């Protein structure tokens, strides 16, 4: 069900959970409001791709983390009133390949359970409000090719630095690595710069 960029408004109906064969739901870039219905959790045996980003939602249900077959989850810019933590239940989504949560007003600490998502190739958490330590478990995500935990230049990162060696060492193996200044050593930053120059 591809309804992205369709100028949709109003509420996402509770009946969305009554579509037992739904594999893809993309309602991104609309003007939907209110709560994402908890009934979405009923799609846990079929839904593999979910796009909710760039709307005006006010509530994000925990039932999202029951969608254990998800391979792609986009929650970029869910809504200006939402502030939530990335819960430990994210570790249940072990089939995720792509997780996009850019400008989603996420707060708290990054859960170590992210390290359970070993199929991830893209983890985009740009411009959120995380703080504290970056978990060493991110170093377990060996399939990652894109990692963005940075903030815009006008906003100071609240992550503790330097980052764990386990994360910085393996991050030199992939092309797209965006982190706060000082997060990794000068040597690692030079290696990334050299690799990018060689690809030009």
Image (cartoon, rainbow, N blue to C red):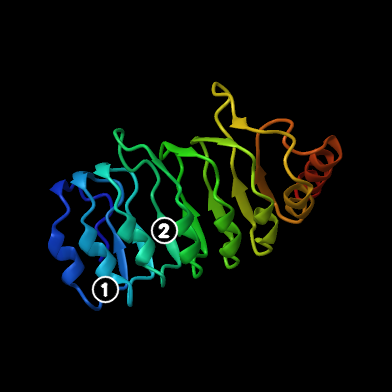
Which residue corresponds to the image point at 28% horizontal and 43% vertical from the top-left? 55
**What is the secondary structure assignment of the residue under circle 2?**
strand
Above or below: residue 43 compared with residue 63: below
In the rendering, which numbered label is found on residue 124?
none
Residue, far top: 154
Q: Nearer the viewer, residue 40 or 76?
A: 40
The percent coordinates of residue 133 (x first, y second) are 64, 40
Horizontal relation, residue 145 to residue 196: left or right? left
Q: Nearer the viewer, residue 27 or 195?
A: 27
Horizontal relation, residue 56 to residue 186: left or right? left
| Figure disc tally | 2
Mark 1 closeness class: few <14, some 14–19, many ≥20 residues within 10 Å = some
Mark nearer the N terminus (1 vs 2): 1
Which residue corresponds to the image point at 41% horizontal and 36% vertical from the top-left? 105
The percent coordinates of residue 150 (x first, y second) are 59, 36
Quadrant of residue 20 in the image?
Answer: bottom left
Mark 1 vs 2: CB contact within 8 A: no
Which residue corresponds to the image point at 27% horizontal and 62% vertical from the top-left? 2
The residue at which mark 2 appears reads as 73
Q: Nearer the viewer, residue 173 or 136?
A: 136
**What is the secondary structure assignment of the residue under circle 1?**
loop
The residue at which mark 1 appears reads as 22
Above or below: residue 72 compared with residue 165: below
Horizontal relation, residue 12 to residue 121: left or right? left
Which residue corresponds to the image point at 55% horizontal and 57% vertical from the top-left? 113
Quadrant of residue 115 in the image?
Answer: bottom right
The percent coordinates of residue 197 (x first, y second) are 79, 43
Q: Nearer the viewer, residue 122 or 156?
A: 156
Above or below: residue 66 compared with residue 74: below
């Amino acid at each position: 069900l591809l309804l992205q960029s369709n100028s949709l408004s109003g509420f996402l109906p509770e009946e969305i959970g009554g579509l037992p064969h739904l594999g893809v739901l993309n309602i991104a870039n609309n003007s939907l409001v209110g709560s994402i219905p908890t009934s979405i959790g009923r799609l846990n045996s079929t839904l593999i791709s979910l796009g909710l980003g760039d709307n005006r939602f006010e509530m994000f249900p925990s039932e999202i983390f029951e969608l254990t077959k998800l391979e792609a989850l986009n929650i970029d810019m869910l809504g200006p009133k939402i502030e939530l933590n990335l819960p430990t239940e994210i570790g249940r989504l072990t089939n995720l390949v792509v997780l996009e949560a850019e400008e989603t007003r996420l707060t708290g600490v990054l859960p170590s359970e992210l390290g359970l998502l070993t199929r991830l190739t893209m983890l985009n958490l740009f411009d959120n409000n995380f703080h504290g330590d970056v978990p060493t478990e991110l170093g377990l995500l060996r399939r990652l090719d894109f990692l963005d935990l940075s903030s815009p230049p006008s906003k100071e990162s609240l992550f503790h630095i330097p980052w764990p060696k386990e994360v910085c060492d393996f991050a030199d193996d992939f092309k797209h690595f965006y982190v706060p200044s000082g997060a990794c050593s000068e040597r690692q930053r030079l290696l990334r710069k050299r690799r990018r120059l060689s690809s030009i």
